[in-house]
Image (tube, grey):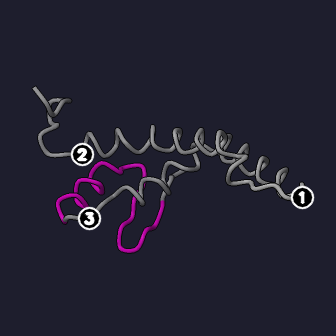
Amino acid sequence: MSNQVNFGEGKINDNYPSAIKTMLEQGKDPKELLIQYCRPQCKWYDDKYDRCVKAFLSLKNADPEKNCMYPYRDLVTCVEACVQPKIQHALRGNEHGFIFH
């Protein structure tokens, strides 16, 4: 099963490194594209956040944005943990696995 996401002109599949490198060379930010690519991998956290929001919406005078902060943080942390290395490894100067000496 191929994992493919369309994002405007950008398209990313399981061979994402070349797509990211091309976007960076063209001066485009691949982060939104990678978020769409990585979010399905964090389904458990996404479902947990959705359950929290639904539970708080069922209560009167409850603000789910304030009360579901921790499940949302967990979701964002999961997605960022997937996105960041994919961008980092595509940056110029990182051919040897590190940017700073």
Distance between the Cα atoms at labels 1 and 2? 48 Å
For image coordinates 45% across by 43% down, the residue present is 80
Residue at the spot 25% in from the left edge and 61% down from the top edge: 23
Q: Which numbered tag is attached to residue 28?
A: 3
Q: Where's residue 97, x and y in %?
A: 20, 30
The answer to whether 98 appears left or right of 79 in the picture is left
Residue range in magenta is 5-26
Q: Nearer the viewer, residue 15 or 47?
A: 47
Kind of residue sitting beneath label 3: Lys
Identify the residue position indicated by label 1 in the image.
60
Residue with the most extreme bottom position? 8
Per the image, is 16 magenta? yes
Q: Of marks 3 and 1, which one's residue comes earlier in the chain?
A: 3
**Amino acid under disc 1:** Lys
Query: The C terminus lies in which quarter of the figure?
Result: top left
Task: Give the mark nearer the N terminus: 2 vs 3.
Answer: 3
Could you classify mark 2 by the number of other residues whose Cα lies within 10 Å: few (under 14), some (14-19), or many (20 or more)?
many
Find residue 50 and report its horizontal and vertical position in percent: 74, 51
Distance CA(mark 3)–CA(mark 1): 44 Å
